[in-house]
Image (cartoon, grey):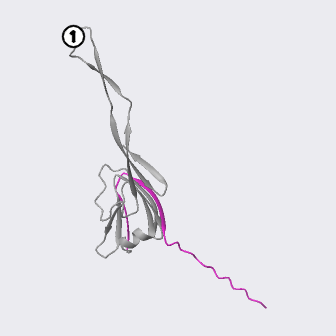
Amino acid sequence: MIIAVLIVTVLVPVSSLADRTSHLPLYESTPTHCDDMIQLHRWEGSCCSLNVTEGNGCILNVMGGYCQVKGQVWTLNYNSTSDQPCPPSEYTSEQLGMKLIKTIKTEPPIAEESGGAAPGITIATTATRIAAVVTVTVAGFAIAVL
């Protein structure tokens, strides 16, 4: 008589997947220090505020923007539509590996009329509007902010 033994292995993923959108601020915390989290993840977004906790862990706050994180501990896509600005972070975008690219965009000239001329004569002047466009590029994604 042969007895077969079936062993079931349950795999628990290390990273948690989260895709959340809220009008409220969003946050996530871990006992892993922020310095290590930066090395273990790829970061993208307009608001990825990281701060070291009292227990030397790390907390991510997302407010009035979005943050995508992909890595060993977290895999998440948080979007906060809150009117509040992104909270201060102990780490800059550059420290998170986000690249900031600045470009200048110009619009076609606009004609403006001057009302100081003699009756029946119109003097037209032109002006060029310049708008600054900031493009954040991370992991092949580009986001333009006017």
Where in the figure is residue 126, as x and y percent of width and height?
Answer: 31, 25
Give the magenta-colored segment's residue range: 1-30
In the displayed orientation, state which residue is furthest to the top: 120
Label 1 neighbour load within 10 Å: few <14, some 14-19, many 20+: few
Residue 137 vertical placement versus 29 (above, below): above
Q: Quadrant of residue 42?
A: bottom left
Residue 43 vertical placement versus 7 (above, below): above
**Residue in the picture at 20% in, 16% down:** 116
Q: Identify the secondary structure beneath mark 1.
A: loop
Residue beneath label 1, please?
A: 118
- Quarter of the picture holding the N terminus: bottom right
Where in the figure is residue 11, as x and y percent of width and height?
Answer: 57, 75
Of residue 77 and residue 133, the one placed in the foreground of this image is: 133
Where in the figure is residue 112, as x and y percent of width and height?
Answer: 30, 22
Q: Is residue 57 magenta?
A: no
Where in the figure is residue 41, as x and y percent of width and height?
Answer: 45, 67
How many tags in the picture? 1
Q: Quadrant of residue 44?
A: bottom left
**Residue in the picture at 36% in, 72% down:** 35
Residue 28 vertical placement versus 145 (above, below): below
Q: Amino acid at mark 1?
A: Ala
**Residue in the picture at 60% in, 79% down:** 9
**Along the horizontal axis of the image, is 18 left or right of 86?**
right
In the displayed orientation, state which residue is furthest to the bottom: 1
- Quarter of the picture holding the C terminus: top left
